[in-house]
Image (cartoon, rainbow, N blue to C red):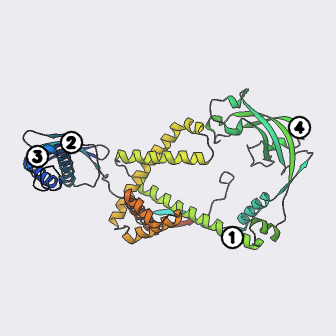
Amino acid sequence: MNITLEKQANCQVAAHIEVPADTVNSERKEIISSFASQAKVPGYRPGKIPRSIIEKRFAKGIEEELRDRLVRNGCSSAAEKEEADVIGLGKTEDATFHPDQTFTFKTQLITAPDFSLPDYNEIPVELEIVAVSDQEVDETINNLRERFAEFNEVDGPVAEGDFAIVDYKATLDGKPLAEADFEVGALAENEGFWVKIDEESFLPGFTAQLVGMKPEENKEVKITLNDDFAFEDLRGKELVYDVVVKKIQQQDLPELNDELAEKIQPGKTLEEIRTLIEENMKSEKETRRTDSMTDQILTHLTKDLTFDLPEHLVQTETQRMVNTMVQQGQQNGIADEQIMEQQEQIMDTAATQGRSNVKTTFVLEQIAKKENIEANDEDIRQQVAMMAAQSGRPIKKLVRELRDSNGFGDIQHRITIGRTLDFLRANAKITDVEAKAATSEDS
């Protein structure tokens, strides 16, 4: 077999393959014999049909089977000659049977990228110490108190800690903000908007200017937005709000006692509620600590690595990221029209993340191979059993679905990657640091 290979960009190798006549004729005879043993032709006993009739009657099927077999074997031989990890094949082109009985075709071998692994032992990470303070527990309990608070309408004036129910409309440079040609959300106007008279509510400086106002009173409120405001087009801009206070409500918080605990979670005392809150907060912080460790490890492994990636894998992962981002937006109540307006930004973000994900996966696969980390049959059986239990499906039905969709390979891969991350985390060099103080932006 004559094989010519030419390396190309994006982990592709162009292959031109010529199969010699004797191989073509040998494969053809084998295929014809297979057809002859199974064919049914009126007037002939099975297995006794002349070869000439088989070749004529089943010419199309024989040629298709021969072409498929020659291409498959040729690609296998090309992969062996390349001595690389071939992970896929491109489209077969110019498949031709020649008068001299040879067969030629062209294809693309998709290979895994070639790169040198960085040192992955004792990767340095800094992690916040997991601790839950009494103040954090108190703040959470106070938030729960607010859920059971009662509100009483007052005549005013507006004071710190009150809730003002307001109507407002904003202008920018003398024009209604609602007419801006960029996204402004609910900043432009609102009716019946509840805002707590607190510096952390709504826009910085907004509620302070409402103090002293009475119901049905109107006021002009000016807000200058800072340089890190969420809406980029409004950074550094001054918004002028026409505000009308419709009503003023005072919040009456319930007492901190077992009666409140019973409302929060029936059958629990206040002390038991505090313990549950502390345990949940600790668990959340431990999860964030693990996530932070993983992020730092992956950044360390990939930040200085540069290598080509198979473009079809990048495109597939990019599309997966787009689907995920759109689905999350819809779940968060973002309208389809708004998602379409952000289509270009979504595509850019998905493309960047998709390329990063594919790169990271190849690095983790190489580490798994080097450390002999893999999932065995028992691991896969346990994972399938867990999937069946979580989805409420019979395990035999799930097994059939996975077999039909070649899903077992994906399960094995996920387990292997997960164990590789466990290995890297277990071998990381951890430096504990004090937790950063929470800010309003973190909440």
Q: Which residue is mark 1?
A: 276
For marks 2 and 1, give the one nearer the viewer.
2
- Where does residue 33 sit, x and y in percent of width and height? 12, 54
Q: Are marks 3 and 1 in contact (CB under 8 Å)?
A: no
Query: Is 303 situated left or right of 293 in this image?
Result: left
- Foreground residue, 71 or 284? 71
Q: Which residue is mark 3?
A: 53
Q: Which residue is mark 4?
A: 216
Please state, as top left, top right, bottom left or bottom right, where the C terminus lies in the image: bottom right
Q: What separation in Å lies between label 1 and label 4 (alpha carbons)? A: 44 Å
Which residue shows up at 8% across the image and 38% down it? Answer: 99
Q: Please, which residue is most extreme toward the front here? A: 43
Q: What separation in Å lies between label 2 and label 3 (alpha carbons)? A: 32 Å
- Where does residue 242 sit, x and y in percent of width and height? 80, 33
Q: What separation in Å lies between label 3 and label 1 (alpha carbons)? A: 82 Å
Q: Which residue is mark 2?
A: 106
Vertical placement of residue 323 versus 433, above or below = above
Q: What separation in Å lies between label 3 and label 4 (alpha carbons)? A: 98 Å
For marks 3 and 1, give the one nearer the viewer.
3
Mark closer to the chain start, 2 or 1: 2
Q: What separation in Å lies between label 2 and label 1 (alpha carbons)? A: 65 Å
Q: What separation in Å lies between label 2 and label 4 (alpha carbons)? A: 80 Å
Amino acid carrying label 3: it is: Ile
- Where does residue 138 sit, x and y in percent of width and height? 75, 65
